[in-house]
Amino acid sequence: MQLKDKVAIVTGAGQGIGAAVAQAYAAEGARVAVIDMNLDAASAVAEGIRAAGGQAMAVACDVAQRAQVDAMAAQVTLAWGRVDILVNNAGITRTAMLHKMTSEQWQAVLGVHLTGSFNCLQAVVDGMIERRYGRIIFVTSAAGILGTVGQINYSVAKAGILGMTKSCARELARHNITANAIAPGAATPMTETIRTDERFKEKYLDRIALGRWAQPEEITPVFVFFASDASSYVTGQILAADGGMTIH
Ligand SMILES: NC(=O)c1ccc[n+]([C@@H]2O[C@H](COP(=O)([O-])OP(=O)(O)OC[C@H]3O[C@@H](n4cnc5c(N)ncnc54)[C@H](O)[C@@H]3O)[C@@H](O)[C@H]2O)c1
């Protein structure tokens, strides 16, 4: 077991990639805080982990709201004593061409991805510094690396996460804390339109070197790697588990 007795927070873990990561971490022996603004979804994931013999708790939290994040981190620390691993996975899209994008759409996406990741980082980093141990994992996207059409807010947020990852890695290395980012390939409901709509499907598939969509279980091993001691000498890196979409 690669994460035996580690305590992990996974945000946006009520479904999709976050849920798969929470399950994978629990299977590797971690105690997992399943964080989502949708408590029913988070509770179902935590219950599934417990039914499979793992340890999990569900906590409702909107990562964009600092007070909720602080309360969530305090609850996890009270229950399990510390936080070793933070996965900043919660995300949303608000799609519109840039000349039509509303200020609300712009702010909402930056609020969840950028402010949300920063809030969670600040809520756990003091404890990691004190204990001289931490694994911070950000989630970016091909959109942040290559740019995209109709999602300038998302692209900017995901590009910002690259800067956050690198700054975090540089600042926290002296405390034995690593920070890395993963750019997952399209695998979950968030990308259903591009995977199923005939207008986009072929165009996107053409850009994936391996020529097929990802399975969630092809992405979770990368999250386990960055959370485990196998990556102790890896920090500030962006790993695209995207079938070769972002070869450059
Ligand atoms: N799906 C993909 O193909 C893909 C590709 C590249 C990057 N990503 C990124 O991976 C991450 C997960 O994507 P997914 O496809 O699993 O998404 P998803 O929409 O399936 O799940 C996202 C989860 O985050 C939760 N959430 C949303 N806003 C929140 C908030 N403010 N606070 C707490 N929880 C919140 C939702 O309730 C949901 O359960 C996101 O950061 C996304 O941008 C996804």
Image (tube, grey):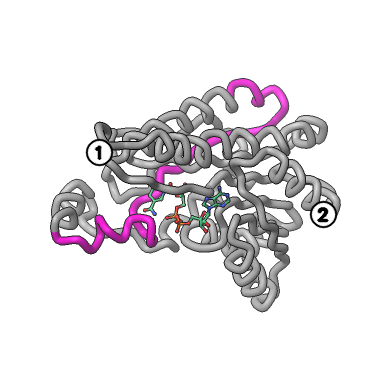
Q: How many marks?
A: 2
Is 48 left, or right, of 161 in this rendering?
right
| Residue drawn 25% across the image and 60% down it | 195
Q: Which residue position is annotated with label 1?
A: 97
Q: Name above or below for residue 206 compared with residue 178.
A: below
Asked whether 193 falls inside the magenta stretch, the response is yes
Look at mark 2 in the image and give the residue it sits on: 80
Residue situated in front as seen by the camera: 61 or 27: 61
At x 64% / y 59%, what residue is drawn?
Answer: 34
Q: Could you say which quadrant of the image residue 169 lies in?
A: top right
Magenta segment: 170-198
Residue 29 seen by the camera: yes
Q: Nearer the viewer, residue 97 or 192?
A: 97
Q: In the image, which disc is placed on residue 34?
A: none
| N-term mark: 2 or 1 | 2
Disc 1, SS? loop
Q: Amino acid at mark 2?
A: Trp
| Amino acid on which disc 1 is placed | Met
In the image, which is nearer the foreground, mark 2 or mark 1?
A: 1
**Residue 99: x %, y % from top left:** 25, 32
